[in-house]
Amino acid sequence: MNARAIQLLQVADDELIVGWRDSEWTGIAPTLEEDVAFSSIAQNEIGHARALYELAAQELGTDADALAFDRAPDEYRCAPLVELHLLEWAHTIARRYLYEEADRVRIAALMGSGDAELAGLAAKIDREEVYHRMHAELWAARLHDEPRFNAAVDELWPYALGVLEPELRDELARRVGRASTSLLQTVERGAHTPDLSALHDQMTEVRRSQPGASW
Amino acid sequence: MSAEAVWAAFDEIPDPEIPVISLVDLGVIRAVSLDGKRVRVEFTPTFLGCPALEVMKRALEAKVTELGGEPDVRVIQDDSWSTDRISPAGREKLREAGFAPPPPRSSGTPTLVQLQAKAFRCPYCGSTETRLENIFGPTPCRSIRWCESCRQPFEQFKTI
């Protein structure tokens, strides 16, 4: 697989899986507003995944649905941060905040890349992400002196670093007000957490029930 | 068949989610070009997760077929659509239907402080005494605001 396809799949898989995790709050968030917010964010993230899979599919001679649903768990290239099953509010908000900050750094890099097709799509994604960042920043500000939230951010910080290529990590550390990243053990992309396989089972269940069907 | 005729026909296709406005008013059709019977259409999604994307594409194809052409509709996933592409007529139609049209992007990327400002007009009574209820709404393109004057919630198009 060429470098471009790998890069597209990394970002697309992050967006699909984080969108799936966000959608787990539909109907059970602590307030109706958050039900709406998480559902809408999930829809956007999965929409971004679809657009990125379309580009990857052209590269790989397949289609977006096959990339999203027909691969084995080990073939996904998502970062462990997005895989974690975190049905607890402080951790959920900590992940949303850290993921949005990492994604902001990554999108800015993609917008400036020489790959015009990917740069154009990144710019479109960025317009939507503005609203996700507002949501994350609002919650991070609201919980900034809440010990459970700060403990969750500490716990997930090594995972957040693993979303980005090494050269972009200092920028993330600067944005979230954390010290130099060099001494930290980063949870790198590549190995998967046990949480991914359960998610994958559920995510692909309907599609697997009728292999080859035209939906 | 001419490009003008195709544009006019597309102006009859309602947005699947907000049928008061046409796909032309919405600004999602970027280009129409004819090569004999072949009609090439470039169209851009509004939000990438919009579930109406496929419906819009099929409606454009059906309209070209109805005109006797062979449709070649391409989805362009670049940055060429923003809410500034909604036509002035389209904005007026949105307002009449109870959707506050999106503020122009001229003032730059939207911020939370801006959204919390009392600068958004209620589509029902015209008051700017409105407040943000939720950045997110029933579809990706809308936020929810509350009008203090007529005491009603309303849907505000997001600027993107």
Image: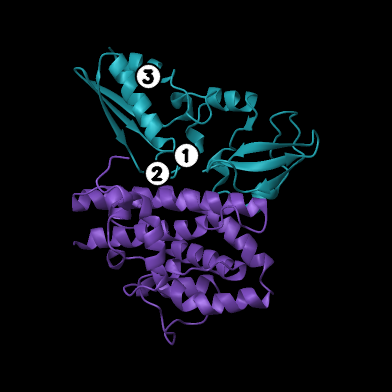
Chain colours: A purple, B cyan
Contact check, label 2 and label 1, Cβ < 8 Å? yes
Q: Which mark is residue B79?
A: 2
Residue B29 visible somewhere in the drawing: no
Residue under circle 1?
B82
Measure how far apart labels 2 and 3 are at the Cα level: 22 Å
Q: Chain of mark 2?
A: B
Name the residue located 41 percent from the left edge and 60 percent from the top edge: A17
**Near-viewer residue (B79 or A24):** A24
**Image position of B16 (left or right of B119):** left
x then y, percent, for residue B55: 40, 31
Quadrant holding the N terminus of chain A = bottom left
Name the residue located 22 percent from the left edge and 63 percent from the top edge: A3
Vertical comparison of B74 with A37: above or below: above
x then y, percent, for residue B84: 51, 35
Q: Amino acid at mark 3?
A: Trp
State which tag comes first along the sequence, 2 or 3.
Answer: 3
Q: Which mark is residue B7?
A: 3
Q: Residue A92 sits in which quadrant?
A: bottom right
